[in-house]
């Protein structure tokens, strides 16, 4: 079971690949998370490989670290199906992109996509929160409190 914590700056976890894959020092890892409740999908990129158990160029154990916030770890807590992918990140060309412009929240020059093959399927639990953000505004010149609910 992979445990990810949204309140911590980093979360490290160990993955045992389903099949032995040929380890190469170049390449990137991504974690696809699908929530069991509503089937929402999130891809966690920028995983840092901390250690890999390699014997005869085959990997049996991978220790990875995820950065909360910057790597899009979902905030709702709960059970997720996790797929670890090994591949490469490539830059996206404007005419070939299949992402909605409004869904990209970074500079276009920094936007890239991840393509790779699934090397492990596992369960994950995200330790987040299901609470709504509530902001209460009060002041000396006001006769009441105003509560704003963000969804």
Image (tube, rainbow, N blue to C red):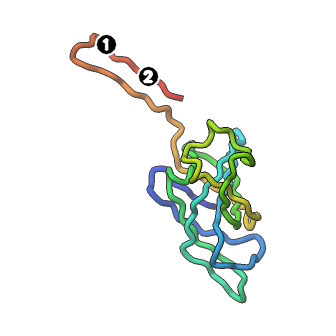
Measuring from the top left, give residue 146's x and y in whole percent.
37, 17
Question: Going by the picture, which residue comes out furthest to the left?
Answer: 140
Q: In the image, 147: left or right of 23? A: left
Foreground pick, 81 / 51: 51
Where residue 148 is drawn, which disc sits there? Answer: 2
Q: Residue at x 61, y 46 (%)?
A: 78
Q: Residue at x 74, y 63 (%)?
A: 116
For the N terminus, the image quarter is bottom right
Measuring from the top left, give residue 145's x and y in whole percent.
33, 17
Question: Going by the picture, which residue comes out furthest to the bottom?
Answer: 56
- Vertical arrangement, residue 41 with respect to residue 143, above or below: below
Foreground pick, 108 / 28: 108
For the C terminus, the image quarter is top right
- At numbered mark 2, what does the secondary structure look like: helix, strand or loop? strand
Q: In the image, 1: left or right of 118? A: left
Q: In the image, 113: left or right of 135? A: right
Foreground pick, 40 / 122: 40
Q: Residue at x 57, y 58 (%)?
A: 3
Measuring from the top left, give residue 71's x and y in whole percent.
55, 54
- Vertical arrangement, residue 42 with respect to residue 23, above or below: above
Q: Which residue is mark 1?
A: 144
User: Residue 22: which quarter of the image?
Assistant: bottom right
- At numbered mark 1, what does the secondary structure look like: helix, strand or loop? loop
Determine crowd level at label 2: few under 14, some 14-19, many 20+ residues with C-alpha closer than 10 A: few
């Amino acid at each position: 079971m992979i445990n990810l914590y949204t309140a911590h700056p980093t979360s490290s976890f160990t993955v045992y690949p389903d099949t032995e894959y040929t380890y190469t020092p170049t390449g990137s890892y991504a974690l696809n998370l699908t929530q069991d409740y509503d089937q929402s999908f999130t891809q966690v990129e920028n995983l840092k490989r901390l250690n890999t158990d390699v014997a005869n160029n085959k990997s049996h154990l991978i220790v990875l670290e995820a950065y909360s916030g910057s790597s899009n770890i979902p905030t709702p807590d709960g059970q997720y199906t996790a797929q670890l992918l090994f591949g490469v990140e490539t830059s996206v060309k404007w005419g070939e992109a299949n992402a909605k412009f409004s869904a990209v929240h970074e500079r276009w020059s920094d936007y890239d996509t991840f393509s790779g093959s699934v090397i492990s399927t596992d369960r994950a639990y995200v330790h987040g929160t299901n609470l709504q953000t509530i902001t209460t505004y009060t002041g000396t010149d006001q006769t009441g409190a105003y509560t704003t609910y963000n969804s």
